[in-house]
Image (cartoon, grey):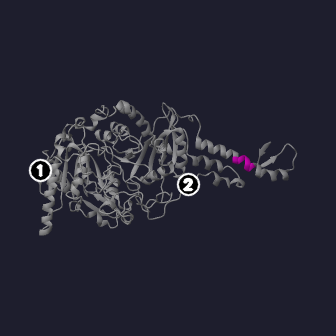
Amino acid sequence: MSYSNSTLVFSNGASPMHAKSLAVPFLKCVVLCLLSILVLVAVLGPTKPIEATHYVYQRYSHYSQVFLSDFPKEVAFLSDMMKPKVLRFCSKGVEHYVPCYNITANVEAGFLDGKELDRHCEVSKLLKHCLWPSPNQYRLPLKWPSSRDTLWSENIKIANHLDILNGRSLERSILMKENKITFISKTDGSDTLYNYLCQIKRMISLGKDTSFSASGIRTALDFSSTYASLAVHLLSENVLTMSLAPYEVHGSQVQIALERGLPAVIASLQSMKLPFSPFSFDMVHCLHCGINWHQKDGVFAIEVDRILHPGGYVVWTSTSPTPHEGLLAHQENASEVVDYITSRLCWKKVAQQDQTTVWQKSAHQPCYSSWMCEEGTHDINAIWYQPLQPCIMKVPFSVLHPVEHQTRPNQIYVEPFPDGIPTEKDSEDAHVWLSSLNEIWSLLTPLIFSDHPKRPGDEDPKTPSNVVRNVMDMNAQYGKLNAALALAGKSVWVMNVVPTSGPNTLSAIYRRGFLGVLHDWCEAFPTYPRTYDMLYAANILSQELRRRDGCKIPSLFLEMDRILRPEGWILLQDDVKNIEEARAAAAQMQWEMRVVEVAGESDQRLLVCQKGWKT
């Protein structure tokens, strides 16, 4: 049999008319077989790399579109059969939707007294499987450090632009002009927030020109309403700050902070423990944060004590005194209650000036005997969905250094962990990871998503500057990616996520001077859509699929698509079987993708994807 100009000639002498009548069905059958083989190659991929050692596959859509374009109209119907079933976009109005934080539904379900502000995924409205759209006027955030000071107002949800000017200390620090919001940050006497931080320095016996990091402060938790402006100042002093605020229907501190390129997470100090390990932060700051510390027998202060490092500082700036006699008396009574609570917590009042008070947590265990939990009644590692506890748990302080004796981050990356924590050799050597990171970073160029990947012998393309501002490590373990990024001098911060499906290593991450949270990936992450530039995860698929109630890959990918900005990157490393299943899910997400071999790991692959634009 031969094929020429769409005319089939059969060796059995059949007439051309009869041959033509048989040609289309036969051609359809042959093409269907060929397309099936093609799709298997595209989906399963070859068993060996194609020429290059790094670039193994091109994206599925490229295979199917080019191949199908070469066939006659008689078989065009097959193109729809061979395309992956892509997901539709969600309806308009959900561009800023955050699952698990439906306050109205929480109230209707009976959650009151502050509990309505907590996350309740069981009563939250579940959207159908669909892709989150971007706002109509959405624009990519400016590159760092420009995004720190300027953001596009159309990217965030604000019912009224004047709503963001509700903090008196910021009234002269924010400018609204057309479609931009500009945050003015100065390091001189004209900046209110700068002067405020200088005041705090004096209160803890630091000089004006001495950085907070000089006193051992590496990490801070900020409850205040400064839209991460405090975090900007502290970052200039080598202090990583996690901004925290409850979910807000009409825009949020968290959304603006992340849009500026700074760490933040949605959470409220109401009835549940915060998603942080014990002794996570060296300083906790509250400026007009609206937390009534004197209520509920001091459980709010006890929770702060749980996450505060021994020797750490608590900075509280209350609202201005009111001239109303009754309210003033109430405030004075509340201050007395706070003094009583802090004394039982063994917080030393370091200084008080105007409306600002600074306490320092004791570094001595015996001081806590008057408010200690009964042995065996509470688990120190139980954090996820756990209620606030009314007592302090006994902790082996001997393994912890007071804040002022802590080493700086650039000294701790390759040091062994203290007793009870695996050494860095056990969890992966940071310098080995640095080598792997250099390869991963070289993938983050426009070239990786072209149809002409680099071949052996070619020079590596120049890595774009400021390609990402933040990275989420979805299965952080001991923060090795974070350490490698820091050693490489990359100007990014990492949200280290420790899944509830694995061992709780969050305390080790904070002891290295990094930031992170505990999270169950079967639920929505506490952040707004489009807030991360890159997602990375090693073996998260294997880990989740091993759980009896583990989340499925399509659901996990939908959440990843929600929290990733357009043109953001996804890097997933896992075994071959899970990566192949992930490729099918990635095709539904309409992500461009490529699979890369992992050096020295024959059963591992790295799936590299890029999210496109969706409206």
Which label sits in the foreground, 1 or 2? 1
In the rendered structure, the answer to whether residue 95 lies left or right of residue 144 reads right
Quadrant for residue 420, please give it: top left
In the rendered structure, the answer to whether residue 69 lies left or right of residue 485 reads right
The answer to whether residue 201 is visible is: yes
Residue 351 circle label: 1
Residue 603 forms part of the magenta stretch: no
Near-viewer residue (123 or 379): 379
Near-viewer residue (337 or 498): 337
Q: Position of residue 250 (x, y in %)?
A: 34, 64
Label 1 or label 2, whichever comes before in sequence order? 2
In the rendered structure, the answer to whether residue 540 lies left or right of residue 306 reads right
Give the amino acid type for the residue marked by disc 2 in the picture.
Answer: Val
Residue at (11%, 69%) from the top-left corner? Answer: 325
Q: Position of residue 8 (x, y in %)?
A: 80, 47
Q: Quadrant of the N terminus?
A: top right
From which residue to which does the magenta span run? 27-32
Query: Which residue in the structure is indicated by mark 2?
Result: 86
